[in-house]
Image (cartoon, helix red, strand yellow):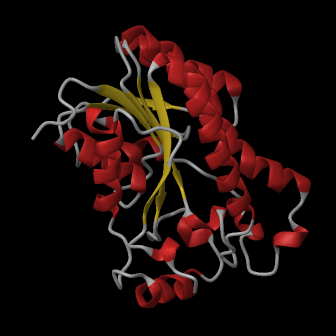
Amino acid sequence: MSLLAGKVGLVVGVANDRSYAWHIAKALTEHGAQCAYAHIPGEKNARRTERAVSKIQDDAKLYQCDAGCDDSIDALFTDYASDHQRMDFLIHSIAYADREWLKIGNFSKTPRKAYLEAIDISAYSFSAMAGHAQDIMKTHGGGSIMAMSYYGSEKVIPGYNIMGVAKACLETTTRYLSYELGEHNIRVNTISGGFLRTLASSAVGGINRIEDAIQEVAPLRRNVDGSEVGKTAVYLASDLASGVTGENIYVDCGVNVMGT
C-alpha cells in the first residue's frame, strides 16, 4: 500500500541505522516516498549517514548542514530546491546538549552557553528549517513538517536536564508554527517517541535505569520499537492526517499515561 506515492521530502538527522530518523526514512520509502537527507558536516559523518541510508535506498541525495549556522541552513534548502521541484515533508530529528550537563545533579550548574546551545540546535533550528520548507511547500499545495520530542519535555526525567527544557521549547515552537503555516495547508506536529537506545540517548545520565523502568511501568510492558515511530511518521506525512496539526503524538507504549 503506497500511502506516500509521489511524495518527496527531506529527512534531517540520520546518524546511523538505529536512529529514529533512519526508522522514519525507512518507513516513508517503504510507502512510496522519495527521501533526501541532511547530515552533520564532516567526511566521517557523511560516510556514516551514507552507510545507513544505503540500507534504505540507492543513490540518495545527501547534503551537509550545521544546524547552528544560519548560512548552512540557508544553503541546505537552496541545494535541495535546486535538485527537487517540490517538498511534501520535512523531518527534523536532531537535538544536542553537552553531555557534561546531562548528568544527574548537574542541571542547576548548566552554564548559559550550554543552556542556549541546546535550545538553539534542538528547537530554534526546527523553526528556521520550517520557515525555509514553507517557501517550497506552499507552491505545491502544502505539506507536512514534523520533529522528534520526548516525555522529558513535560515530566522530570533525572539526567535529561537541559534536553527536557529544549524539547518543551520544541513542542511550543511546533504549536506556533502550526498556526502560522496552516494558511498554506502546511501541517506541523511532533512525535514524542519512547526510549530508544541511540547515540543521543546514550549521553543521558541514568540511561540503564530508565530503560529498565519503562519495561515495568509501560502499559504494553515493553520499550517502543523504532519502526513504530516510523509508521506514525508515515501517517503524519500522508493524506490520512490531513486534519492533524499542532499535535504532540505519543508513541511510547503508553508510558505517558502512567502516574509513576
| Residue closer to the observer: 168 or 245 | 245
Residue 48's place in the image compared with 175, above or below, is below
Q: Position of residue 10 (x, y in %)?
A: 40, 31
Q: Residue furthest left?
A: 1
Image quadrant assignment for residue 143: top left
Note whether residue 122 is visible: no
At a point 43% along the width and 19% down the height, the residue shown is 80
State left or right for residue 88 relative to residue 1: right
| Residue closer to the observer: 179 or 223 | 179
| Residue closer to the observer: 114 or 184 | 184
Q: Position of residue 220 (x, y in %)?
A: 33, 80
Q: Position of residue 102 (x, y in %)?
A: 71, 70
State left or right for residue 221 relative to residue 69: left
Residue 242's place in the image compared with 97, above or below, is above
Q: Position of residue 87 (x, y in %)?
A: 38, 21
At a point 77% along the width and 68% down the height, the residue shown is 101
At a point 34% along the width and 32% down the height, the residue shown is 242
State left or right for residue 29 relative to residue 104: left
Q: Residue furthest front?
A: 243
Count of numbered tags: 0
> Which quarter of the figure is the C terminus placed in?
bottom right
> Which quarter of the figure is the N terminus placed in?
top left
At a point 73% along the width and 68% down the height, the residue shown is 161
Note whether residue 74 is visible: yes
Residue 78's place in the image compared with 120, above or below, is above
Residue 209's place in the image compared with 257, above or below, is below
